[in-house]
Image (cartoon, rainbow, N blue to C red):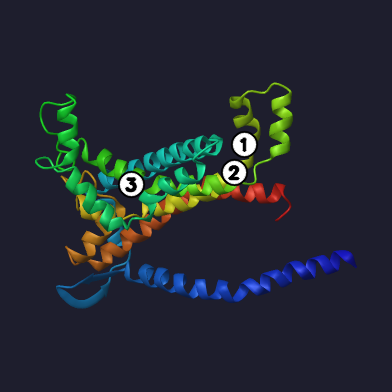
């Protein structure tokens, strides 16, 4: 009887979620299905007639000479960006949490970059990175680190690292916010017991704090991976994917195929490829989340 009552309550909770799930399915499912359909058509604004061409768009996308470079750029942009955001965000949150004074003010200051709109951030840093009047080159010259101006956004060898740095400056506060929130419920009893027995901070971090933070790290990792991989406005405003496609990622090239080359069919095919890549990159995080839920008995 108790088992039947517990199962009915469980399924009752799912019924409450059903309306929201249906709305999300309609809002997300329709665009994805429509995009998948037009990816099998030759749709070019120069020719109003849409003709079915099967997987030709996918073949053209995968055999495009730019495709290997764009996929490499996307992986570097996403993996390196998320790894740096996670490392610095967790480190900053742990440092601020250990402060005895000024903790509240540090939390407020650390969140400021995340509150600035993406386009404003891109315009601000593009001006600061300017080779002739940018303040970054002026500071580096004044302290003697460089003799000639660095072309941060015009040199293919440094342009990707420049936009990754700007995204790091803007997105790390989200990691800081999530980890700081998780630290509010850290296991004080375990920490005090381990401290009494002589455990040092690295041991506490490895065996107490990080296991406690792992669900939040996994969830935040999924969100930031999806956001970073699909990020468009910062790169577009700063470099437009250049120079020489050195900062062109899948979202940037998808946009260019549609609105510069007027090839909506090939753009839709590239969007499907991007969706598959996002799904593959998020699999480790999702597996971690579900394994944690099974351990806690929520599945």
- Callouts 1 and 3 close, C-beta under 8 Å: no
- For label 2, the crowd category at 10 Å Cα-Cα, with few meaning under 14, some 14 to 19 and many 20 or more, is some
On the image, the x and y values in percent for residue 93 come to 50, 40
Query: First in sequence: mark 1 or mark 3?
Result: 3
| Observer-nearest of 269 and 108 | 108
Residue behind mark 3: 167
In the image, what residue occupies the spot 27% across and 57% down? 119
Q: Nearer the viewer, mark 2 or mark 1?
A: 2
| Quadrant holding the C terminus | bottom right
On the image, the x and y values in percent for residue 168 come to 35, 43
| Observer-nearest of 200 and 297 | 200
Q: Mark 3: which secondary structure?
A: helix
Q: Mark 1: which secondary structure?
A: helix
- Callouts 2 and 1 close, C-beta under 8 Å: yes
The disc at residue 183 is 2
Relative to 6, 68 lies left or right = left
On the image, the x and y values in percent for residue 115 come to 38, 55
On the image, the x and y values in percent for residue 54 come to 32, 66
Query: First in sequence: mark 2 or mark 3?
Result: 3
Q: Mark 2: which secondary structure?
A: helix
In the image, what residue occupies the spot 67% across and 74% down? 15
The disc at residue 209 is 1
Query: First in sequence: mark 2 or mark 1?
Result: 2
Q: What is the CA distance from the residue labelled 1 to the residue labelled 3?
A: 27 Å
The quadrant where residue 145 appears: top left
| Observer-nearest of 289 and 275 | 289
């Amino acid at each position: 009887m108790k088992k039947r009552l517990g199962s009915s309550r469980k399924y009752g909770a799912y019924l409450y979620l059903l309306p929201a799930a249906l709305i999300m399915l309609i809002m997300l499912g329709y665009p994805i299905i429509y995009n998948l359909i037009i990816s099998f058509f030759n749709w070019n604004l120069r020719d109003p007639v849409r003709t079915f061409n099967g997987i030709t768009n996918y073949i053209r996308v995968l055999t495009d000479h730019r495709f290997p470079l764009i996929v490499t750029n996307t992986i570097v942009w996403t993996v390196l960006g998320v790894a740096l955001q996670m490392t610095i965000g967790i480190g900053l949150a742990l440092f601020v949490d250990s402060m005895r004074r000024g903790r509240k003010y540090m939390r407020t200051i650390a969140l400021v970059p995340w509150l600035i709109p993406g386009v404003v951030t891109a315009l601000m840093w593009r001006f600061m990175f300017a080779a002739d009047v940018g303040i970054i080159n002026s500071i580096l010259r004044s302290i003697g680190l460089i003799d000639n101006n660095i072309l941060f956004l015009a040199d293919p060898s440094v342009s990707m690292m420049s936009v990754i740095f700007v995204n790091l400056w803007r997105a790390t506060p989200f990691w800081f916010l999530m980890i700081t929130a998780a630290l509010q419920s850290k296991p004080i009893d375990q920490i005090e017991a381990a401290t009494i027995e002589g455990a040092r901070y690295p041991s506490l971090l490895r065996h107490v704090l990080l296991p406690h933070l792992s669900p939040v790290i996994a969830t935040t990792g999924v969100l930031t991976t999806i956001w970073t991989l699909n990020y468009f406005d910062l790169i577009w405003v700063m470099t437009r994917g250049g120079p020489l496609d050195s900062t062109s990622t899948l979202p940037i090239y998808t946009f260019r195929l549609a609105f510069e080359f007027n090839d909506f069919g090939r753009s839709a095919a590239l969007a499907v490829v991007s969706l598959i890549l996002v799904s593959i990159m998020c699999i480790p995080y999702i597996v971690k989340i579900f394994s944690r839920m099974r351990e806690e008995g929520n599945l």
